[in-house]
Image (cartoon, rainbow, N blue to C red):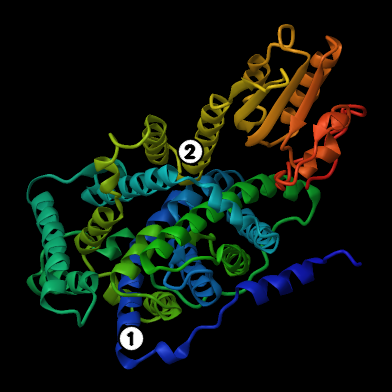
């Protein structure tokens, strides 16, 4: 039998997960909704891409090209229709150190390598590990994200001051800005009650832009951030030395960026899936993100990943298919090529109002109501993830949340190990073990038994327990040795057949039963050799 190749994995992935779009669902009404949703997303993408470019220390077009290319490719082949990807702040904060130290060409090379790593993650189906993210972590993640989005919009209330240092608005400029933001939010809230012809966020942007331009109101506009005018992105091989020294520089950054990008993308995939009622597609999304970033690196883009804020705008505007994401990417390109002067006139207040409504929709308000009704550990994890998201970044917050949740789970299960005892008519003592036996509960397991004072025959029944890992097997072997050392007979009942094979020293003590469980333990372990073997 031949070993599976990378190509075989890729072929299996494409067969198992790729689903062609059902074009029969594209009625004229659906097409209109999808395209208007895409246009709304594109308008919101412009200031975000420009802002993240500044964070990373690159030209605004580098961020805009990334938003176009990453958005287009993931919209076409991504794991979740209606999900939006582009340049993000989570990646930009990592890129800034690389750009400052080595220049933008090293960034492009890093983005290419980042994409390759993400493709490998998809081919190897590593995306399935997103299932390990507990629900409290997800709630903390979306709450932290809502706060981060809110805080990011506050920079729009700043203007250049003396020596270029940005200062907070005051007086009438601040009043105008706040008034337009509140009016935008009110329009977005009222529009669905009046009409569903156009998405509410698009109505808010259009009406506020018309008011500002028509009355000549002096407020910050998109063009005040930077000019978005440009041409088509051109193919360019990153101008870096192709040697080991370059790899040493870019690989750590590529690995971190790939991990952050996939974590954020897969969490967004789950969040959008909950809203749209879809599931699966994790590995396909990994491949799509990887391919998008690889291409972006060769076309002068800063790379990107899924954008939860823009995805929420798309979904709330009615986007449900790939057409909305494709439309958003193509509209963004059109803005760059032919409509830059028009888009630069859009007031930032309208876009801030849209993002504030996204914040309200994203924050899991129900999590505040259930804090007193859920376990204290879950409440602490939720608060921790929210705090780390705000203070650090989304990926680190999720990793911290998963680790803390896993430790809490292990601690709680370690305390569950106990035994009910009784004696048989023949005088044997029976220990009925309750709770999982694993590395965290082995000490508690050992303390259950009194091998010095127990009768000559002792029966340990594992019917209501489960042997999980090598530490559990070693604990059983040690228990058998103790009873053997005092000349007493130990019988082990209701162990799985897997345990039968690997408990070498205690093997003759196991009593076979027709109702023995059939689960598999994590590893093989031999007390005689002390060597770990293959898993079952």
Q: Residue furthest front?
A: 425
**In the rendered image, which residue does mark 1 sit on?**
30
Seen from the viewer's position, the closer of residues 133 and 481 is: 481
What is the x, y in percent for residue 44?
Answer: 32, 66
Say if 125 sits above or below 369 in the image: below
- Name the residue: 12% across, 73% down: 193
Quarter of the picture containing the N terminus is bottom right
Seen from the viewer's position, the closer of residues 29 and 236 is: 29
Q: Give the tally of numbered discs.
A: 2
- Name the residue: 55% across, 75% down: 77
Say if 27 sits above or below 320 in the image: below
Q: Residues within 10 Å of mark 2 (few under 14, many from 20)?
A: many
Seen from the viewer's position, the closer of residues 487 and 180 is: 487
- Name the residue: 44% across, 43% down: 137
What is the x, y in percent for residue 370?
Answer: 28, 41
First in sequence: mark 1 or mark 2?
A: 1
**In the rendered image, which residue does mark 2 sit on?**
401
């Amino acid at each position: 039998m031949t070993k599976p190749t990378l190509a075989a994995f890729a072929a299996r992935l494409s067969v198992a997960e790729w689903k062609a779009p059902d074009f029969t669902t594209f009625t004229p009404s659906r097409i209109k909704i999808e395209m208007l949703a895409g246009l709304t997303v594109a308008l919101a993408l412009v200031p975000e891409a420009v802002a993240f470019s500044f964070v990373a220390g690159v030209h605004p077009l580098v961020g805009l090209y990334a938003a176009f290319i990453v958005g287009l490719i993931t919209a076409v082949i991504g794991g979740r229709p209606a999900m939006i990807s582009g340049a993000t702040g989570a990646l930009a904060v990592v890129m800034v150190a690389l750009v400052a130290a080595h220049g933008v060409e090293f960034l492009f090379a890093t983005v290419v390598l980042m994409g390759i790593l993400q493709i490998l993650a998809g081919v190897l189906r590593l995306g399935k590990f997103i299932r390990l993210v507990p629900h409290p972590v997800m709630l903390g993640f979306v709450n932290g994200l809502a706060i981060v989005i809110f805080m990011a919009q506050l920079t729009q209330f700043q203007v250049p001051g003396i020596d270029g240092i940005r200062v907070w608005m005051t007086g009438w400029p601040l009043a105008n800005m706040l008034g337009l933001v509140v009016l935008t939010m009110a329009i977005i809230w009222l529009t669905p009650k009046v009409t569903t012809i156009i998405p509410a966020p698009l109505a808010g942007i259009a009406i506020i832009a018309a008011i500002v331009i028509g009355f000549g109101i002096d407020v910050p506009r998109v063009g005040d951030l930077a000019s978005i005018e440009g041409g088509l992105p051109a193919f360019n091989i990153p101008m870096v030395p192709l040697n080991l020294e370059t790899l040493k520089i870019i690989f750590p950054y590529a690995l971190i960026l790939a991990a952050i990008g996939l974590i954020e993308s897969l969490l967004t995939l789950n969040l959008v899936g909950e809203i749209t009622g879809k599931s699966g597609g994790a590995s396909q999304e990994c491949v799509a993100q990887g391919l998008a970033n690889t291409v972006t690196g060769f076309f002068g883009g800063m790379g990107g990943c899924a954008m939860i804020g823009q995805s929420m705008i798309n979904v709330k505007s009615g986007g449900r298919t790939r057409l909305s994401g494709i439309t958003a990417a193509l509209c963004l390109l059109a803005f760059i090529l032919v409509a830059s002067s028009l888009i630069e006139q859009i007031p930032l207040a309208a876009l801030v109002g849209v993002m504030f409504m996204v914040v309200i929709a994203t924050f899991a308000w129900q999590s505040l109501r259930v804090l007193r009704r859920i376990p204290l550990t879950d409440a602490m994890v939720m608060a921790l993830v929210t705090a780390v998201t705000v203070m650090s970044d989304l990926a680190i917050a999720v990793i911290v949340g998963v680790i803390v949740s896993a430790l809490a789970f292990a601690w709680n299960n370690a305390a569950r190990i106990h035994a009910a005892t009784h004696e048989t008519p023949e005088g044997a003592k029976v220990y009925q073990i309750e709770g999982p036996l694993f590395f965290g509960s082995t000490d508690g397991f050992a303390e259950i038994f009194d091998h010095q004072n127990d009768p000559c025959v002792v029966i340990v029944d594992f019917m209501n327990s489960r042997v999980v890992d090598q530490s559990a097997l070693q604990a059983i072997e040690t228990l058998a040795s103790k009873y053997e050392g005092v000349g007493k007979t130990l019988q082990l009942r209701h162990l799985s057949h897997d345990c039968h094979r690997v408990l070498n020293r205690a093997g003759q003590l196991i009593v076979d039963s027709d109702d023995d469980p059939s689960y598999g333990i994590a590893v093989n372990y031999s007390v005689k050799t002390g060597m770990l073997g293959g898993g079952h």
